[in-house]
Amino acid sequence: MNGTPPLADALASATVVLDGGLSNQLEAMGHDLSDELWSARLLTEEPEAIVEAHLAYFEAGADVAITASYQATFEGFAWRGLDRARAAGLISSSVELAREAVRRARARGIGRPLWVAASAGPYGAMLADGSEYRGRYGLSVAELERFHRPRLEVLAAARPDVLALETVPDADEAEALLRAVRGLGVPAWLSYSVSGDRTRAGQPLEEAFGLAAGADELIAVGVNCCAPEDVEGAVETAARVTGLPVVVYPNSGESWDATSRSWDGPVTLAPALARTWQASGARLIGGCCRVGPTTVTALARTLTPRA
């Protein structure tokens, strides 16, 4: 769009910097996200805040904005009393809000290529009960495909640069998502949430990434919402099994304490780690939970020649 090359073309010769956690940036701006819709609630109530959060990451050095649609589903909005047409409009608006951030970035003199990735979170994100980090929902691949396809159709129709099939805990759900994106006409990346060398549901990563090998819609595969220490092995496995560019955006390294409802422990996401991931095949690199603009700036300065 507007002279920006397709993201897949850029990955052939450069490393692209992703944004950080949208929710933690919104919280840093003073917004309360403590409900089932999480950041998607602001699609209905304060869409301008989402634009400003995206813009903060572009100004920090990110090349890609991941939309506020991670937890935006027809089912989730229905629980809030919104009909299907209204829900579809809100899901679509997540892409337009990111596009507006691109326009404002251009107006502020940011001339490098900028892309929009439309987020599609796992089934468990809609449940808002932590099952997105476990998988194994008791649903078949066909049932999961039927859940994901309508939302992906709406996101694809909004014309993002790429669909981010992200935080996928289970190879069965990955199979469903790969079926659901067929024929949509928008490229995608597939990103697992992992623990060690396995998906959150316990499947070996070699097996999980094997599903992606040969999937025409995919321009990258990888991991997100995981410990930084889990990334290097995953990058090597993803690159070897699929031959695709690898996408990585781990958490800060802190741990969530569900009892105190707070984060604790040290930050272990050091920008220098990103050089190792880059050398192993990672071409889309950013951050997830608890990673903000300051860290994104450090990543951008580490990974790219720009200041």
Image (tube, rainbow, N blue to C red):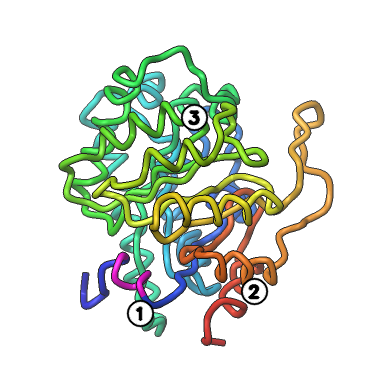
* Picture residue at 60% right of the left edge, 55% below the top: 29
For mark 1, does the 10 Å Cα neighbourhood hold few (<14), some (14 to 19), or many (20 or more) residues? few
Query: Is 294 part of what is drawn in magenta?
Result: no
Please tell me whether mark 1 or mark 3 is closer to you in this view: 3
Tell me, yes or no, if residue 226 can be seen here. Answer: yes
Kind of element beneath mark 2: helix
Instruction: Give the mark, 1 or 2, whose residue is nearer the N terminus.
Output: 1
Disc 2 marks a residue whose amino acid type is Ala
Q: Is residue 195 left or right of residue 92?
A: right
Q: Which residue is mark 2?
A: 298
Tell me, yes or no, if residue 30 can be seen here. Answer: no
Disc 3 marks a residue whose amino acid type is Asp
Q: Position of residue 237 (x, y in %)?
A: 53, 51
Give the Cα distance between marks 1 and 3.
41 Å
Q: Quadrant of the N terminus?
A: bottom left
Q: Position of residue 156 (x, y in %)?
A: 22, 46
* Picture residue at 51% right of the left edge, 61% below the top: 19
Q: Quadrant of residue 131?
A: top right
* Picture residue at 32% right of the left edge, 49% below the top: 163
Q: Note whether 110 is above or below 283 in the view shown.
A: below
Instruction: Give the mark, 3 or 2, whose residue is nearer the N terminus.
Output: 3
Q: Which residue is mark 3?
A: 170
Front-lying residue, 289 or 226: 226
The circle drawn on residue 107 is: 1
Q: Main secondary structure of the magenta part?
A: helix
